[in-house]
Image: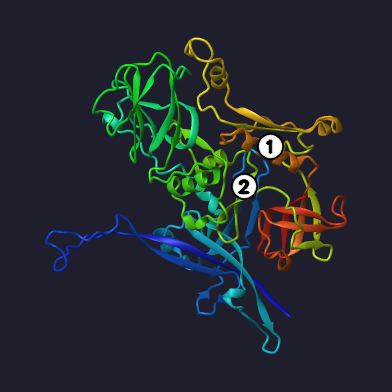
Amino acid sequence: MSGVLFHLVEIDMERAVDVVFSRGYGTKPAGCVTLLSFRRSEIDTLRLSDAGYVDDSGQSYPPLLADAFAIDRRLDLSPASPSSRESWGAVSIANPGGMFDALIRDRVADRMPIRILAGQKRHDAARQIDIDPGRAALTAVFSGLGSPWQPDRLNVQMALREVSGWLDATLMPVGSYAGSGRFGGDSNVKGRSLPRLRGTALNLTPVLIDAVNLVYQISDGPGVVSALYEGGFAGGITYGGAVDDLYAAAPSPGSWHMQSGSGGLFIRLGTKPVYAITVDAAGDFPSGVAPRTVLPLLRQMLIEDLTMPAQWLAGSWDDSRQAGWYWDGSQAVTGRQVVNTWLSGLGIRLVPGHEGTLSPIALGMPSTSPDRLLTSDHVTALSGLALDDGLAPPPYRWRIGYARNQTVQQAGSALHPRITAERQSFALQEDRVATWYLPAIKLRYRQPGDLPVIPTALLYEQDAQDVADHHGALWARERHLWAVTLPRSIARGFDLGQAVGLDLPAPGLRGGVTGLVIGEQFRSAEATVTLTILV
C-alpha cells in the first residue's frame, strides 16, 4: 500500500567571516602576516520537509514547509531569444516563535544553491506507520539558486531561480578607465567600461583612450588585428608592426603599431585620421584562452567573464563554427544578453536540468525512435497549446545573418573616396544573409509566417546556410504544442530537451509521433506533473 508523498528542501546559506590577520611568530619572519583570503565565509545548509524525514545518516528534516509550492519551467521557442525562460515559483517556511529570525539576519541565501527532492514513504500496515525511504530513492525535482529572504509575520518565503538566474547579473568583472593617462585612459573615457572582443569580429570601432597620442583599445585581453580601415579604406594607413610598449616611440606618419598582452589589445596611429577608424580583429580572454568557435566561446565567457562555476556547465560544448562578437563598453550587458548574442538564430538552447546544470541542446526532432512512449495508459489529461509567435503558420523562409558588421557606416562623405565598391557595400549593411525558402508553404497558406533576418555571431556563409536549412527542416511542417499530464511515477526521468514518443487519441498523435519536452509544470500538492511537448 502506498504511503505519504513528501518533499525535502535543502538551502545553502553563507555567513561572511571577518578576516583576522595574525602574526606568524615561530613559523615565519617577524612582521609577516598570514596569507588569508580577502573574504572568508562559512556555508551552512538549512534542511526542511513538508511531512518530516530522517535520512540514512540520521540527518533530520523537520516538517516546516508551510505551503504547497509550484515550479514552472519552459524553453522559449523564439529563434532570436534562445536563453531559456527561468523557472518560477517559491517555497514558504514556517517561522514559529521567530526561530529563523537570526538566520534571516546573519545568513545570505541569494544565488546560493537550493535543492528540492521528492519521495514516497512506504506504509507499514502491520505497525500503521510510514517508513522513510533511503536518500538514494529520492528524485530531484529542482536544483537552482535561492533568492533573498522575504519574511512576513509567520512565514519566510524564498523565490526559486534556475541556475540560469545567474545570467541576469551584469557582465562581471567589468574594469573601467581611471582617467590616469596612458593605458588608464584620458579624461574623455574616465569611468567608461573596457571593451571586450571575444573571437573574431569585423569592422569594429576601437575605443580612443588617448586622444593626444592616438591610442585605441580593442579588448581587455590579448589578440591580433588583421586589418585597419580609415573610412572603410584599408590601404591608407600601413601596418608598422607589433611592439611591447606603444608609448616607447610614436609610429611613423601614415602607419600604425599594435600592442597585445594580458592587459589588452591596443593600436596607436602615427597620423591623426580624417575618417573613422575601424578594424577586423580576433580577441582572446585575459587568461590567454583563445577559443574561436561558438560554444567554446560561450562556455569560456560564462566561466571567465560571468564567473559562473564550471561545474554548473554540463553536456557537450564541441563546435566547429567560427564566430565572434564585440562589446565596446558603452552599455552594461547581462549574462542573459551574452547568451542570446552567441546562440541567437542557431536553434540551440541553454537548457537547465533537474541536477542544477546548464547544457547546450539543439532544438530538433531525433532521427531515431525515442526510448519512452506515452499512451492513454499513462496520460491523465491532454490539451493543446498555442505556439510562439511567428511559428504558426510555418514560416516560408528563414534568413540567417552572418559576417556581422560591428560598425554600420553611412554613405557619402563619411567614407574614404578610395574605398572599393565591395567594401562600401559591406560597410553599409549590418549582416550578410543566408536563406532557406520553400514556395509550397507560401502557396498553401494565405498568410504564412515570415520572420525578420535573425542576426548571429557566425562568420561564414556555409555555417549560416546550414543553420537556415536546419530551421527549414524543423518548421517546414505544422508543429503543435500539447500539455500532457502524467502521474509523477511515470513523469520521473523526463527533463527539458528530451525526446518522447506519443500515441494518443488526438489529431496528429494517433499511430505514434515523436515529440520534444520543452516545458514542465510541477505542483507539490498534486500527484501529477504536466509536460509541454512539441510535436
Mark-to-mark CA distance, 1 and 2: 16 Å
Outermost residue on the bottom side: it is 126
- The disc placed on residue 84 is none
Vertical placement of residue 267 versus 490, above or below = above
Image quarter for residue 352?
bottom right
Image quarter for residue 248?
top left
Q: Position of residue 290 (x, y in %)?
A: 44, 43
Decide if residue 56 is on the left or right side of residue 450.
Answer: left
Asked which secondary structure carries label 2, the reply is: strand
The residue to which callout 1 is attached is: 468
Q: Position of residue 341 (x, y in %)?
A: 55, 38
The residue to which callout 2 is attached is: 349
At label 1, which amino acid type do we have? Ala
Vertical placement of residue 49 versus 475, above or below = below
Vertical placement of residue 125 versus 527, above or below = below
- Pointers 1 and 2 in contact (CB under 8 A)? no
Crowd tier of the residue under label 2, counting other residues whose Cα lies within 10 Å: few below 14, some 14–19, many 20 or above: many
Q: Position of residue 433 (x, y in %)?
A: 64, 29
Which residue is found at the position 50% from the left and 35% from the top? 325
Decide if residue 248 is on the left or right side of residue 352.
Answer: left
At label 2, which amino acid type do we have? Arg
Q: Does residue 23 appear in this view? A: yes
Asked which secondary structure carries label 1, the reply is: helix
**Callout in the foreground (1, 2):** 1
Q: Nearer the viewer, residue 245 or 512?
A: 245
Decide if residue 122 is on the left or right side of residue 302.
Answer: right
